[in-house]
Amino acid sequence: MSDIYIVGVGMTLFGRHLERSMESLVGEAIDASIGDAGCQKTDIQSAFYTSATQGYLQGQTMVPGQIVLNKNGIEGIPVFNIENACASGTSGFYLAVQMLQAGSCDVALAIGAEKMNVPDKSRMFSVFDGAWDVDSPEENVDRLLKLSDGFEVPEGHESKRPYSVFMKVYAAYCRQHMRNYGTTQRQIASIAAKNHQHSVHNPLSQYRAPYSIDEVLAAPPITYPLTLPMCAPISDGAAAVIVCNEEGLKRIGADKSRAIKLLASVVRSATSRPSDKPELHCEHLAAKEAYEKAGLGPKDMDVAEVHDATAMGEIMHVENLGLVGFGEAGPAAERGEFSIGGRVPVNPSGGLESKGHPIGATGLAQIHELVFQLRGEAGERQVKNARIAIQENSGGILKIEEAAVAINIFSKN
């Protein structure tokens, strides 16, 4: 089977783009990826378009990919529309890889975009209500809140402003972790502070202001133990990745020395595991599968991008990836092990908390960052001697864990 390479990446600045169209955001990301790859739009033989909120917020409930790509000069090729909640972008990437490995094409585009900032803020937040079983919302909440039974929540730590229901979910995960392992709010805040400090050096990040741990703790509360800087913002933006096999690499004349090799790509869905068996988490199982495919282990990873929709997300994901043991992420974060210059830098881009989180583009933006890191082109946020990278992207909730998870491992060619 032919090796698979990433030859071009591009993304917009993430943030609030009320004045811009989906067409312009998608076009900017595609043009950047085309320029990065040194190819033409006519070289792309298939496209996978990912957007989770466009139908709900803009009313484009069908064929959004065909429409925005046509407006940007890409037409006639197979176009597939992918929705997998916050894991949409990497799911599109995974399917592009499958098409290449099947021999159906030799150059493919994965492109994701969202415009989540809309005038009606209640509608903006309610979009998340569809990311779990809509037939049993009260049962969903009860099941997840029971994860932290026995944990006393201090008063005065609940926002009076609207926020995503998923912040309640992450808060429940936080309190369960705090109860089971002794993780502290300060350790969780150290994740947020680290990611905001990383984002200072990312020109495409939504937020670029540094935070100290004390500033994170003193910020307005969302729901205990989460404060505002610990949570990903509502974001607009687009990201694109051009991927090819050996034949495509030759056909477009890409510089192989800059191409990034895919070592493993795994997608899994949630299971009905018991809550006291974290080693059976679908993401942990997916990570083990990815390491086996790559012939590597957690200790071989030089840099990681993980799905920190909240700071607690990063704690959960680095444990699921085996970068630390279960219950060890909080102390490791406080010691600086996940900072640039630490043992295994995590989210040098600033992560979702700072870089932003336009759902359909998020996973592809993570790949964008890791490509820059492995090429040695990340500037002041460069991880020294980065040769192997791992990406984790997840979305939705089913039972007690993420409904969809995607793991990719990449290497410097």
Image (spheres, rainbow, N blue to C red):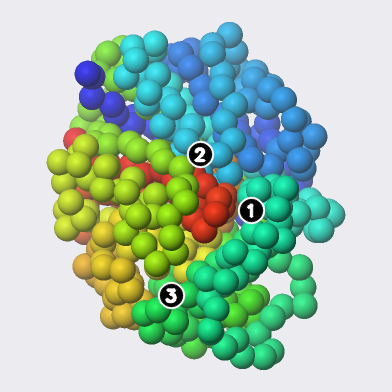
Judged from the image, the secondary structure of the residue bearing numbered disc 2 is helix
Q: CA distance from mark 1 to mark 3?
A: 28 Å
The reply to whether callout 1 and callout 3 are in contact (CB within 8 Å) is: no
**Residue 167 in sight here:** no
x 47%, y 51%: residue: 272
In the image, is 205 to the left or to the right of 336? right
Circle 3 residue: 177
Mark 3 or mark 2, whichever is nearer to me: 3
Q: Which mark is residue 235?
A: 1
Q: State the image coordinates of residue 401 (x, y, percent, origin top left).
A: 49, 55
x 40%, y 38%: residue: 267
Sequence order check: which comes first, mark 3 or mark 2? 2
Q: What's the amino acid at mark 3? A: His
Q: Nearer the viewer, residue 7 or 347?
A: 347
x 57%, y 71%: residue: 146
Circle 2 residue: 89
The reply to whether callout 3 and callout 2 are in contact (CB within 8 Å) is: no
Q: Which mark is residue 148?
A: none
